[in-house]
Image (spheres, rainbow, N blue to C red):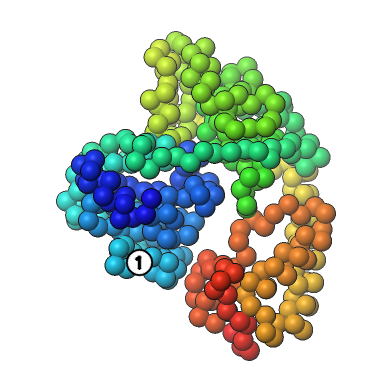
Amino acid sequence: MNLRNFQQQLKSDNIEAFLVTRNNMYLNQDVKEEENQLLKLSGFSGSQGYMIVTQKKAWLLVDSRYSIQARIETNEKETEVIDIKSFFPAIIALLKNQNIKTLTCNPWCISVYDWENFAKKGINLVANENILQNVVIRNNNIFEHKIQFTGKSSHDKCLQVANALSEKYGAMLITSADEISWIANLRSGDLEHSPVLRAYGLLSKQGVLTIFADNCNYSNIRPLSELKDELLKYTGQTILIERNFTPQKILSLIPEGVKTDTRGQNPLTPFKLMKNDIEIDGFKKAHIRDGIAMVKFLHWFEHNYKGKTEIDIVKKLKEFRTEDNMFFADSFSTIAASGKNAAIVHYNPKENCSSVIQEDT
């Protein structure tokens, strides 16, 4: 669906304004191109931004990293780009300036925390998960991140977090892909740059972890449709939910009789942040291996840059990195920019528009 068709849909459904995020049900994670509704509607390919779309107008809000890029990638006749310092205050200001009273959004793509904040500012939020439907998430390349790299088994991590979980909770719901990947010692190769497992988890006070995700080829991962039935086991008990990482939609799926707390302290995050000796040693070795690849590349570049394009540089650097049998993926698209492109903070070249490297650029 392009922007004009989307606006026509808003008109047909009598929707005043719609908030478009870059999220799917795994908030603040990388998304595939086919999952990226922000890209589809605006053409903007950056890693962070929000759109407010009405029946006649559209605004794209970006921070300073994407000020130039957003204006290059969007159609100024369709979308007005607004530079901001902080997204939430800027969105609120725009809504008030345009006298927008009701804001519709996909409840899978906005956190409990953000939903609460909009409500506090007097914005009437309406959930609509049909007009911009979620693309099917697939997890087809799941593998174990072995203990030789993690330094601690998933079983031990689960017990450690469960022991730190307040006695008032029967379980905690884990909706952050980063956190479920860490505690389960599982990874996935489905995303180009982030090897996270896109799944939810329910960790009991006894340290038992149950993982839920659709379209998996890995044993012991249950379909997301079974999450509600699992939650029923905690009727009369309270479930801890991390409001920053949990989609608003999840609250509507909690069975009657199961209490939730969205303001309690998440005990998992501090353990994930505190790296053990094996993890620290792994970081050091990875930097050394990548440093070797970079030195090889810089030597090659010094003698071979003439006539090469930006995309040639990207491919050659990856070639040196992949010579190491421990290489898995780039952590983000390589920023290889020359000339005027160097002014674009998160620039990465494409096959069909890649500048030739010039002297002193």
Q: Residue at x 45, y 45 (%)?
A: 23
Q: Which residue is denoted by mark 1 in the rendering?
A: 75
The correct choice, above or below, for 333 with respect to 202 in the image is: below
The correct choice, above or below, for 130 with respect to 321 in the image is: above
Q: Quadrant of residue 319?
A: bottom right
Q: Quadrant of residue 121?
A: top left
Residue 78 showing in the rendered view: yes
Q: How many marks?
A: 1
Q: Residue at x 50, y 49 (%)?
A: 34
The correct choice, above or below, for 222 with respect to 332 in the image is: above
Q: Quadrant of residue 330?
A: bottom right
> Residue 183: x and y, percent?
65, 33
The correct choice, above or below, for 197 with respect to 22 in the image is: above
Left or right: 313 as drawn, with respect to 166? right
Left or right: 192 as drawn, with respect to 132? right
Left or right: 49 as drawn, with respect to 157? left
Q: Residue at x 56, y 71 (%)?
A: 352
> Residue 361: x and y, percent?
59, 84
> Residue 182: x and y, percent?
65, 37
Q: Amino acid at mark 1?
A: Asn
In this view of the protein, which residue sits in the foreground, 326 or 15? 15
Neighbor class of circle 1 (other Cα within 10 Å; few <14, some 14-19, many 20+) is some
User: Please, what secondary structure does the residue beneath circle 1 have?
Assistant: loop
> Residue 17: x and y, percent?
25, 47
Q: Residue at x 74, y 75 (%)?
A: 298
